[in-house]
Image: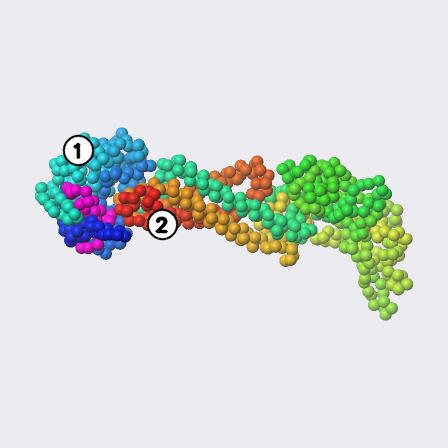
Amino acid sequence: MIRLENVSKYYRSLSSVGVGIRRVTLELSQGEFIVVTGPSGSGKSTLLNVISGLDTYEEGEILINGEETSHFTVDDWESYRASQIGFVFQDYNVIDALSVLENVLVALELKGYDKTTAKEKARLLIDKVGLTNRLHHRAGKLSGGEKQRTVIARALAKDSPVIVCDEPTGNLDSASGKDIMALLGEVSKDRLVVVVTHSEEDVMPYATRKIRMRDGQVIEDIVMKDVRKEHDRESFIVPTMTFGTLFRQSVRHLFRTPKKLFFMVSLQVFAVALLVFVYAFLMASSDTLIGENAAQSDSSHQMRIVRKDMEEVDASYFETLGPVQDIGLYPTAYEAFVAFSLPGERDPLSNFPLGEIRMENAAVLDDQDLVTGDLPALGQVVLSDVMLELYGLSVEDEILLFDRYMRFDNSVGMRFEIAGTTIRGTKETVYFNPGIFSDQAIALKGLIQVYGKVPYHYTMEDGALVANTFGAGQIVFSDQLPSGTVEVPVHLLPDPMETPVYAFDFVFGPYYGQSHLFHVEADDVNQSAAMHSNIIMSRSFEDDLIDVFLGEQYQTNDIIVNVRDLTDGRLLSGMLDHQIYRVFYDVNAASTSARVMSDREFRTLSYAVVLGLGLAVFAVLGGVMKSVNVDRRKDFSVMRAIGAHRQDLAASVMIETIVTSVIAYGLTLVIAFLAIAFSYEVRLAMRHVDITSYGWLFVIVMMLSVWIAARQNRKFFGYSVITALNQNGDDAL
C-alpha cells in the first residue's frame, strides 16, 4: 500500500538543521500490524507523520498504491488523509465541545454519509468500543480511556485502509492500554495498522512486524507474522461536504458552546447596535439638512394630493395607508392664518402681528412629542418650544391669529389658547386641533387671496384695451354694502383723470387647483377715504365663493394628507400610483443653494460613515473573537488531520460568524424596538430607518462578518497540520 524509497525529513531552525528521518526505505502492506519503536528523538513520530501526510518530506519518494506523491499539493494530501488514513493520537485529540456521538459523526460526514446513515453507523461503532452508555456525554468530560476509545471509533468510522497510532496507550492505565491494543489488533485483520510506542509488551501479542529506529534511521525491520494481503488501488478523491453538512456542523458546534456563543453574540450585538443607531440618528438629522428647514416655508407634514384626471379624490382610500395621520378635505383651511400677535388693552385694530406662522395639523403629534401641556382642543394650539422661547410665551397664554393680508393692519384676529409646546417644528410652526381643518368658515379664510395685486382694465386714447394692477390688503366681507358692490380705498386706485378704469378683476382660489374670478364693473366699485389697504366686498361675493368652493356640489378634487415627517412622506409617496395621482410635497423642492445635499447623497454618505465605523469596530471585534476562538484552532487541526479540507473548514468559520451575526442583528432589532417604547429620542431616530435601510445595514453587517471571518481563517489555516497540532493555541495564533 505504502512504499518509502530513501525518504528524508529535516527540521530547520535559524541556527541548525535537525534530522527527522534519514534515507528510510520501507514497504507497508494491508493486513500488517506494524510496531515502530525506538528511543525519544529516534524519528518514529516523524515517520508516522510522513506516512500519514501530516508532514512533508525533502528527499526520496513515497508511493501510495503505486502513485508518486512528491508532486502532491496540500489539497492532495487532504484527500489522501480523508480517504486512506484513520488516526489514533496520544493526546486523544477529541473535539471537547462535542459529544461522543458527534465526534464520530464528524468523520462520517467527511466521507459524505447522509445524516441518517451516519447516525446508525456511528452508534454501531460506539457500541463496538464499549461507549454506548456515554453516547451523549461531552468528550471533554470523559476519562482518558474513554477518550481514546472515542478516537478509535472515529478512526474506524472512516473505514479507511490505514490506521496510524501515535503512543495510543501513553496516557492510559495498563488495563485500558491492553483493551485498546486488543481492539486495534482486531481491526488490523483487513487494514494496515502502524503503531508508534515506547511500551512493546502491550502491543507485541498483536504485532506482525516490528521496526526499530535510531537517529532517524531504520536499524531493524523484523517480520513476525507473514499476513500481507493484496490491496486494490484506490483513488484519493473524497466528496466535498455539502453546504447542508457544513451548516449542520457549524451550528452544532455553536450551540454546544453556549457560554462562548452568548459572549460572541453579545459582542456583535454591541457592534451591530452601534452601527444601526448611528445610521438612525444620521437619518434623523436629515430632516434638518434636507427637510423643512432647507425648504424654508414648506411643510414636511402636508402632502397635497390631486388626481391627474381632475376627478374627485376618494379620501377613504388614504385612510387605509399606514403613514397617514389625518386627511384634510378643505385644503384652503391650512392657509387660513398666516401671522400672530398678542392680545392687549389697545384698540383691537391696532394689534400688529409679531411674526408669520405656518399652520399644521396636531394629528401628526402624540403625547411623547410634547414638552409641556396637552394636545390642543378646538380653540387651542400647540407651539414649538422654539417659538415659545423666542416670543416669551407660556402655556395657557392667548395669541391672536390673523387671516391672509398684505400689510398686517386693522385686523382684529382670532383668539387661541396655548395648550402645550413641542420639540417638533420650527419657530413658525403652530399645531391646531384636527377639527379646525374641517371648518368651512376657516376654509373660506384660506380661500380669500388676491395674490397681492388686483388687475384693472382701462382704454388708451387710441382705443387700445390695457390691463394693469394695484396693490391690495385684506379682503373683508360686509353686510353694509349692496349686493355685487366693492369698496376700495381711494389711495389704492389709479388717478381717474389719467386712467379711466372701466372694470376690476378679483381672483379667489387655493394655491393649487381651480380659481374663481369676479369681474366687477367700475360703476360697482365705490371709493372710500379710509387709510387702510383693505378691500371691502358685499356679502354676496362670500356666498358665491362658498357655493363654488364649499357648497353642496363641493367635491374633494384635492386633499391634504398629513404625515408625521419627511420619512413618512417619502414612504407614502412610494405607496401611491403616480400615474393616477399628482403629489405636491414642496419640502422636497428646496433650492439648490438651500440644500446641503440631496437625499440620495445623504443616504450614501450615511452608509459610508456606517461602513467606515464598522471596519474599525469589527477590527477590534475580530481581535477579541480570535482570542476567544483559540480552541477552534485545535478542533480544526484535528479535523484536518482526519481529512477535512481547508476550504470546507474555512467555509465553516464563515458560517459560524455569519450565523452569530444574523442572531446578533435580530437581537439588535428586538432591543431597538424595545428601546423605542421607553426612549422618545430613540423612537424619533428609528422612525427614519425604513425596510430598505434595514436591508442595506444587514448587508453591511454581513460584509463585515465575512471580512473578520476571512482574517480568522488566515490565522487558523496559516500553519501546517502537524505544526498546529503540536503548538498550543496561543502560539498557533
Residue 467 x, y percent position in the rendering: 81, 63
Instruction: Determine crowd level at label 2: few under 14, some 14-19, many 20+ residues with C-alpha closer than 10 A.
Output: few
**Residue drawn at (15%, 51%), measured in percent from left and top?**
24
Q: How many numbered badges does the structure rendering display?
A: 2
Residue 113 x, y percent position in the rendering: 28, 43
* Numbered tag placed on residue 178 in the rendering: 1
Instruction: State the residue in front, 120 or 43.
Output: 43
Query: Image check: 399 left or right of 214?
Result: right
**Residue drawn at (45%, 41%), measured in percent from left and top?**
267
**Residue drawn at (44%, 46%), measured in percent from left and top?**
620
Q: State the SS at label 2.
A: helix
Residues in magenta?
35-60
Query: Image check: 101 left or right of 440?
Result: left
Q: Most extreme residue toward the bottom, as rendered?
A: 462
Q: Is residue 419 above or below residue 299?
A: above
Residue 319 x, y percent position in the rendering: 62, 42
Residue, disc 2: 714
Q: Most extreme residue toward the top, as rendered?
A: 133
Q: Quadrant of residue 425?
A: top right
User: Does 53 appear in magenta?
Assistant: yes
Instruction: State the residue in front, 516 or 334.
Output: 334
Q: Amino acid at mark 1?
A: Lys
Query: Image check: 412 left or right of 200?
Result: right
Q: Could one spot residue 478 in this view of the protein?
A: yes
Q: Most extreme residue toward the front, as rendered?
A: 15
Q: Amino acid at mark 2?
A: Arg
Q: Is residue 420 above or below residue 355?
A: above
Q: State the SS at label 1.
A: helix
For marks 1 and 2, the one nearer the N-term is 1
